[in-house]
Amino acid sequence: MGEKINILVLALSFVSQGAMAICSPAKSDEPVTDKSDWGIVETAKEAKTLWEQLYLGGKRLRNRAFVEASTNKILLPSSPGAPILVDPQFILNLSGHIHQALTKSYGEHLFYPDMGHAHLFRPEKKELDLQEAMKDHETKILYHTAELYRLRDKIGKKGKLVLDEWFQWRYYSRNFVGENAPKGELSVLLNRSGGYNTVRSLFGHRQVGTIYFSGSAQGCFDLNRDGKSIRYDISIRP
């Protein structure tokens, strides 16, 4: 309970532990990372090394969310158009999902090659944009992990799973979905017909947008795992 309260306090106030400084809008010379930084990851050891370099290296997501000092609101840059207003509860729900995924070994590191993005699906009966979907409790959040891990020895259905047991586990657990709610439990999904086990749709829902998240020691948002803080940023641009 204490952990969830701490996350919520951070999401709602951003006043402790120097959070206003790290949640201010990005400067033009801020180092950024994106998908093009990464190649195919061959081993868990390589993934850990890349993650540590990223987390401590100072790079943050391009067009990351920030806190508007005058209103204390979380804003997510969107081009073209005005920034998207992010519901603080969505940050809490996202942090809860990430914590569950790490605990259940669905993911290991918060960056694109391992676990770094999720797709938001609105109910078909509701016409919602991304900002509205982040507030709606019927929105489902579909995560894809091991995005750049070499899980098969060849691309496509003919490729065989690699012999590494950890990568095999990551193959079968790479899709999971959670509700946009404080206690949303994660459920693993399978796509047996696809060559890389990628679930792209959810029954009764339509995709409305994608959220990217990436760890950084200077990240705006915070969650606690095994007594250690993990900071991260979010963006709608990879």
Image (cartoon, rainbow, N blue to C red):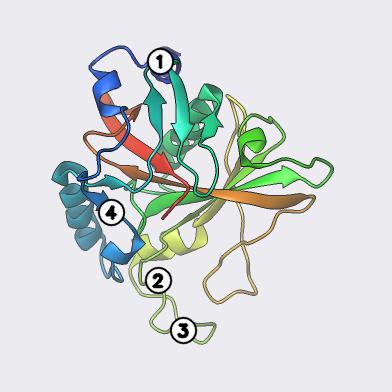
Could you tell me how far apart the alpha carbons at marks 4 and 2 are, in whole angstroms? 24 Å
Q: Which residue type does callout 2 highlight?
A: Leu
Q: Earlier in the sequence, mark 4 or mark 2?
A: 4
Q: Is residue 115 above or below residue 165?
A: above
Could you tell me how far apart the alpha carbons at marks 1 and 3 are, in whole angstroms? 54 Å
* Residue positioned most to the right: 125
Residue at image point 21% right, 44% down: 30
In the picture, the disc for residue 70 is: 1
Residue at image point 45% right, 42% down: 101
In the picture, the disc for residue 178 is: none
Residue 75 location, x and y as percent? 46, 31
Q: Earlier in the sequence, mark 1 or mark 3?
A: 1
Residue at the spot of label 3 = 159
Q: Which residue type does callout 1 highlight?
A: Ser
Disc 3 secondary structure class = loop
Residue 149 location, x and y as percent? 36, 66
Residue at image point 36% right, 17% down: 14
The label nearer to you, 4 versus 3, is 4
Residue at image point 48% right, 29% down: 91
Q: Residues within 10 Å of mark 4 (few under 14, many from 20)?
A: some
